[in-house]
Amino acid sequence: MTLTFGLTRIYHKLMKGMLMKKTIFLFFLSIFYFTGCATSNKHLLKIETIPTDAIVSFHQTNNISDYNRQISGTTPLEENFDFGEVGQLWLEIEKRGYAPHIIKVLPKTEKISINLERIKYKNGKYISNYALPNINSVLLAKPDIKIFKRGFSSEKISDEKSITAQEEFTKGIEKFFSPKYEVVTVESSNLDKKLLRPLWRDVRSAMEIADPVRLKYLAYPPLLETKSSRKAVYELGNKYGTEVMLFIKGKQNIETAGLIAGIAGTAIAGTATSYAGGYNRALANNDSFFVYNIYTPSFDEGTLLGKAILIDCSNGEILWVNRGLLENILTDLFAAINHN
């Protein structure tokens, strides 16, 4: 009886050891399968367009949407594209004033040349290439800055600190753009407030959905959504004698023990997280792809993040939009205006 019991225990130990070895073997086999056997399906593809400087996005499926968009660069373009297991990609090619072009490509495609089709407004006038107007002065709407005080179990807006932050940030913008550009801040008259209401409504919506990278490549110039907001920005620009209008929305979290809201000016230190800036740096560094995802970056105490948008006062066109650290947003805007 004792002998039988002892042999049984030895048998189970041996079986347990064999099972463990088998499990380990299968584990490493699976790693080998997914890393060693799963080879990439990359192939060189040359893309040329007439005219040049069209932006190229690629999609893994024929469901063309912003959610699965990856931006490669501008034409002429020569890159190794990963065609994946399916072995096909859909390219979307865009340029201001030209009809968007979508084409399916295979690993054997190697090269495509596309003559983009020029498009017109309904009045028969051709759409011009993207360009900022000549800017001498910028009309600034009072920045929508919210300072949140975080406690142990609650979070609420500090009206006092928010007002201080708005005032400090307005001063920072004026100093940042001077002496090259004049910054005029909208007054608090009842008429101005009435004009700003529809404007802020459309601006907040545009801040969320406008793509900072693709904006200047969209076929048609994007406009503020409603006629009332386009009329409002025209009237404000005409009243103050400015070519463009700048809207800024920001948020900052501080602990109740607290940071001073006055640091919310443009001198905040931090790594750049602005999207358009990231794309420009990717091109400058010859990065293969710039994967563009809409998201709100996480931030530490004291960091002021937000969104900004520049509107043409003459017609309500959305000229520029960006998201990220407000310091870097303003730097990108200043560079865009100077480059223009």
Image (tube, rainbow, N blue to C red):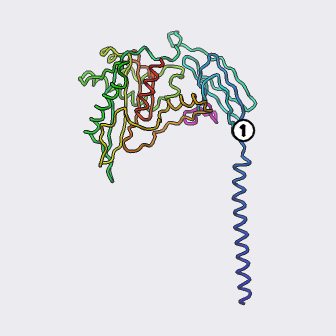
The residue that label 1 is drawn on is 41
Number of on-image labels:
1
Q: Kindly give the residue lying farthest to the right in the view shown.
A: 108
Q: Which residues are magenta?
A: 57-69
Give the x, y percent position of residue 332.
45, 27
Which residue is at 54% across, 33% downward?
Answer: 66
Where residue 296 appears, x then y in whole percent?
Answer: 45, 39
Of all residues shown, which one is farthest toward the bottom?
1
Q: Quadrant for residue 52, please give it.
A: top right
Residue 308: image quadrant is top left
Q: Residue at x 70, y 55 (%)?
A: 30
Residue sitting at the far top:
124
Magenta segment: does it hold 116? no
Q: Decide if residue 140 is on the left or right side of residue 5.
A: left
Whole-percent x, y for residue 194 in the image? 28, 24
Crowdedness near tag 1: few (<14), some (14–19) or many (≥20) residues, C-alpha within 10 Å: some
Quarter of the image where one finds residue 143: top left
Please say if 278 is above or below 5.
above
Identity, as a three-letter code, of the amino acid under mark 1: Asn
Q: Quadrant of the N terminus?
A: bottom right
**Callout 1: helix, strand or loop?**
loop
Q: Is residue 268 left or right of residue 189?
A: right
- Horizontal and vertical percent position of residue 288: 63, 32
